Amino acid sequence: MGRFFRNIVKRYLGEDISYERKISIVFILSIIVAAVGAIIVYILQGVPLLIQLPTFITLIACVIVLLTLKADNFKPLTVLMFLIMFLYLPYAYFTSGALDSPTPVFFVTGIFMFGFIIKGKAKILIIAPLAAFYAVLLFIGAYLPPFEYESPFERGFDFAISFSVIAVMAIMATTIINVAIKVKENKTLRLMEELQEKNRELEVLSIIDPLTGCYNRRFLYDNCFDMLETYIENDLPFSLMMIDIDHFKEINDNHGHDVGDDILRLLCNTVRATIRLHDLMIRYGGEEFVIVLPNCDRSIGLDIAERIRHNVQESKTRENVKFTVSIGFTTHEENDTLDTMISRADNRMYTAKNNGRNQVV
């Protein structure tokens, strides 16, 4: 039994159902409850069957629509709602005693419900005449002879049924709206978090070389200018080196570009294992790399450069291909900028190549 009710709730009020449809279903359910209550009152009062017939028809129509309701077909529900709003509620209003019955409150809730499920210009075209229609009915009902109940019990029972239905309807509609708002807020929050995460990923991708995992030239120029200025202001040493793989074109020509890619990755892994944790390795272009050495003087920097040269010389790829590098090293001098330091290190790297390669200048 519990599973049956859970399936019913999931079908009509589940998360996948739009809140407009949920409110419509709640309204239809309230009409069913009100119709059942009205029939009970009619039976207790001995009302003729002809008077009860519209209520029976409305009840059966509501049940049929709910049982046959499909997520992709909103038309039967819309038609039923129009019949209820324009025919059944006015009928109930007058047959239950006009202003002596709380039926007018259904008018308000009905207009409220239409405001949620109708979109665009159609909302005004439907709600405006509906409100005018109900206003006329209320005006007419105010001048009708009041309906007299035969006993206080009948009056109390009528009012209790009507107000109970209205209260349940209001609570359910409010709950649906609150849940819909929370679901929408959660979806918005998730989308914002996903967007922020993607932005972070894009930001990382924009400064990382995909082949080697090193920083790229954009990172160098976006960050290292300020870094150099900070070290200059605090009178701290700052060094960098330019590294180039010797005979890299010949390696690609003789062994293929896959081996060339392996050499680039092996070089980066070897250098990262040799430099300090706060040093930065940047792929400057092709087989050229810049190593930024903050808080590093000439003696320490040359020692790091020599260890890089030696470790690279001792390494080899999976295909047993060995390679060497030429390194140009420089430290910050008076009036230096990052560009002048890179240029000087680059010139010294070419000097190393011209002097026989596999050396530090």
Image (tube, helix red, strand yellow):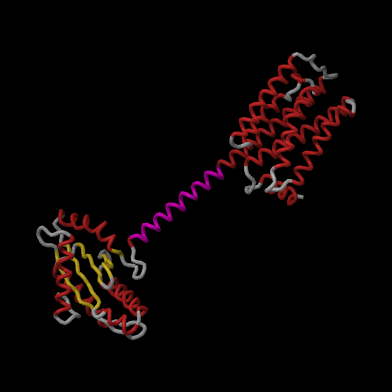
Q: Which span is picked out in magenta? A: 182-206
Magenta stretch: dominant SS?
Answer: helix
Q: Quadrant of residue 95?
A: top right
Q: Is residue 316 above or below residue 175?
A: below
Q: Is residue 150 left or right of residue 336?
A: right
Q: Is residue 207 left or right of residue 190?
A: left
Residue 203, x across and y down, in percent: 36, 57
Q: Is residue 336 above or below residue 251?
A: above
Residue shown at 84% from the left, 31% from the top: 40
Q: Is residue 70 above or below residue 344?
A: above
Q: Quadrant of residue 33?
A: top right
Let me know if residue 234 is in the magenta part.
Answer: no
Residue 44, x across and y down, in percent: 87, 27
The quadrant of the rendering that contains the C terminus is bottom left
Residue 92, x across and y down, in percent: 78, 26
Label count reads 0
157 or 174, which is in the foreground?
A: 174
Name the residue furthest left: 334
Q: Is residue 19 above or below residue 83?
A: below
Let me know if residue 193 is in the magenta part.
Answer: yes
Residue shown at 26% from the left, 65% from the top: 280
Q: Quadrant of residue 47?
A: top right
4 or 224, which is in the foreground?
A: 224
Residue shown at 19% from the left, 58% from the top: 228
Residue 208, x across and y down, in percent: 34, 63
